[in-house]
Amino acid sequence: MPVTVQPPPVVIPYYRVEIRDLLKAFKALSDETRLRMLLLLLDRDVCICEMKEVLPLSASQLSRNLNMLLDAGFLRRWREGRCVVYTADRNSANPYCHILLDMLAESLGDSQTIVEDKKKLQQVLAQNLRQG
Amino acid sequence: MRDLLKVMKSLSDGTRVRILNLLMQRECCVCEVMEVLGITQSTASRGLAALYDAGILKRRRLGTRVLFSIDHEAAPYCQALLHALQKALERDETCLRDRDRLQQLSPAVADCVRH
């Protein structure tokens, strides 16, 4: 009777991906600008033109930093007319993101910089810059 | 925010994460960390110093050895980060191997006879 040898199944070492993802998340959070962005995005969705009014950065710096946060699994983004809108993703595929997001909200939510950023965002939103 | 950034920076490194993995098992000295991870003394010392400076570790002197351990009284965000980290490390192959090596460490090394 012929013996058929099955090739071994391809096992993706998901645990490796997990630790790499976590390091990526830590790196993404190792920067003050990115922390400030993320804290703004925790409460609501913000488009790049609104973000630009709160944090004085060039468009390319803004998208580079937002992309790092997006890449680490902290954000969701979509398009609304001519605007690209971002928000914090509490159902991220990276299971540690929500632990980290809660930790950030709890430990930085009351810090002066963040409170001022949020106040500024409210003023900016009142001007209705979004081009839907 | 500055303190939190410091903690994040100290954790954004594969070697330091492996060091923490050992310290989550038990208190270790520099020589044990070097031996188990197969890294040089300067890498081990720098990694431990960065984690200590960030406030994640505490240290005590025992004779000629300096023993490092996780500071369970560290800021609440440290606890949350370590919790996330521990979950990720549980199933990581490299970290599992490191933990085995730590358990099998010869007493000679553990007593720092080599140094």
Image (cartoon, coloured by chain):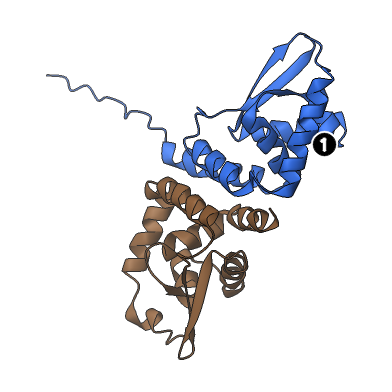
Chain colours: A blue, B brown
Residue lying at 63% horizontally and 54% vertically, measured from the top left: B4
Residue A122, placed above or below residue B98: above
Apparent side of residue B95 relative to residue A83 in the rendered image (left or right): left
The residue furthest bottom is B63
Front residue of A119/B70: it is: A119
Q: Quadrant of residue A25?
A: top right
Front residue of A96/A13: it is: A96
Apparent side of residue B89 relative to residue B11 in the rendered image (left or right): left
Q: Chain of mark 1?
A: A
Residue A123, placed above or below residue B43: above
Residue B8 image offset from top left, x and y in percent: 62, 53
Residue lying at 41% horizontally and 62% vertically, measured from the top left: B24
- Location of the C terminus of chain A by quadrant is top right
Residue B96 image offset from top left, x and y in percent: 37, 54
Residue B4, placed above or below residue A56: below
Front residue of B79/A7: it is: B79
Residue B30 image offset from top left, x and y in percent: 50, 75
Q: Amino acid at mark 1?
A: Leu
Residue lying at 31% horizontally and 30% vertically, measured from the top left: A8
Q: Quadrant of residue A109?
A: top right
Residue A70 visible in the picture:
no
Q: Which residue is mark 1?
A: A55
Residue B79 image offset from top left, x and y in percent: 48, 55
Residue B71, placed above or below residue A56: below
Secondary element at image label 1? loop
Residue lying at 38% horizontally and 79% vertically, measured from the top left: B110
- Location of the N terminus of chain A by quadrant is top left
